């Protein structure tokens, strides 16, 4: 049986987003235990020229659910909105994203295969087939931002391991 576009993307996005709830819980506890403000945690970066932790979590949501919304509309543009500024707001954003991703209909996504999705940033417009946009642009961005968010927390000292990142795998049996 061929793998559907939906099954190649949505379950993994949901799994990693659900895992990020655990990272957020551990980061919040770490911050409280170490006298670090939420504001400082939100602004953590791996290096000065990278965007902060809260942006990375926001982007995980945007490059999953936002990508689905973009292919539905035929156009996707960068999200310039202000990232959530607290653990509670990040958790809420992730929860809402998981809820909406869980409702994405597999048949609807499959019907979008072969259609056009444009990435539009200012005057720049790049045309993709929907499946290429999702599998090569959004999926890569999703994993970049999720790995970066995880790495920021590890760099700060939050006790996270690979299992925290991977979450519950869909094992046989």
Image (cartoon, helix red, strand yellow):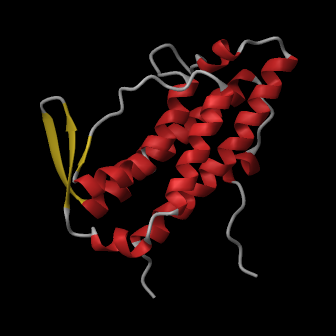
Where is 95 relative to 78, above or below?
below
**Residue sitting nearer the eye, 49 or 34:** 34
* In this rendering, position of residue 42 left or right of residue 64: right
Counting the numbered discs, the total is 0
Residue 27 lies, in percent from the top left, at 75, 29
| Image-quadrant location for residue 131 | bottom left
Residue positioned 49% across, 25% down in the render: 83
Residue 167 lies, in percent from the top left, at 71, 54
* In this rendering, position of residue 94 left or right of residue 48: right
**Residue sitting nearer the eye, 102 or 114:** 102
Whether residue 144 is visible to the viewer of this picture, yes or no, is no
Whether residue 27 is visible to the viewer of this picture, yes or no, is yes
Residue positioned 57% across, 19% down in the render: 45
Hey, which residue is sitting farthest left in the picture?
A: 123
Residue positioned 47% across, 21% down in the render: 50
* In this rendering, position of residue 115 left or right of residue 18: left
Residue 116 lies, in percent from the top left, at 18, 59
* Quadrant of the snapshot with the C terminus: bottom right
Hey, which residue is sitting farthest right in the picture?
A: 33
Residue positioned 12% across, 30% down in the render: 123
Where is 127 relative to 155, above or below?
below
| Image-quadrant location for residue 68 | bottom left
Residue 73 lies, in percent from the top left, at 25, 53
């Amino acid at each position: 049986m061929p793998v559907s576009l939906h099954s190649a993307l949505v379950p993994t996005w949901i799994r990693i987003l659900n895992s990020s709830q655990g990272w957020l819980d551990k980061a919040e506890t770490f911050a409280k235990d170490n006298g670090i403000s939420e504001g400082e945690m939100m602004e953590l970066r791996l290096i000065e020229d990278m965007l902060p932790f809260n942006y990375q979590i926001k982007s995980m949501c945007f490059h999953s659910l936002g990508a689905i919304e973009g292919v539905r509309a035929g156009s996707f543009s960068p999200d310039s909105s202000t990232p959530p500024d607290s653990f509670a707001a990040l958790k809420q954003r992730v929860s809402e994203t998981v809820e909406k991703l869980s409702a994405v209909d597999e048949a609807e996504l499959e019907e979008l295969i072969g259609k056009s999705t444009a990435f539009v940033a200012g005057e720049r417009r790049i045309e993709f087939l929907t499946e290429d946009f999702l599998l090569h642009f959004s999926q890569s961005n999703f994993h970049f931002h999720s790995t970066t968010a995880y790495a920021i927390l590890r760099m700060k000292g939050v006790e996270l391991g690979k299992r925290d990142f991977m979450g519950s795998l869909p094992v046989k049996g």
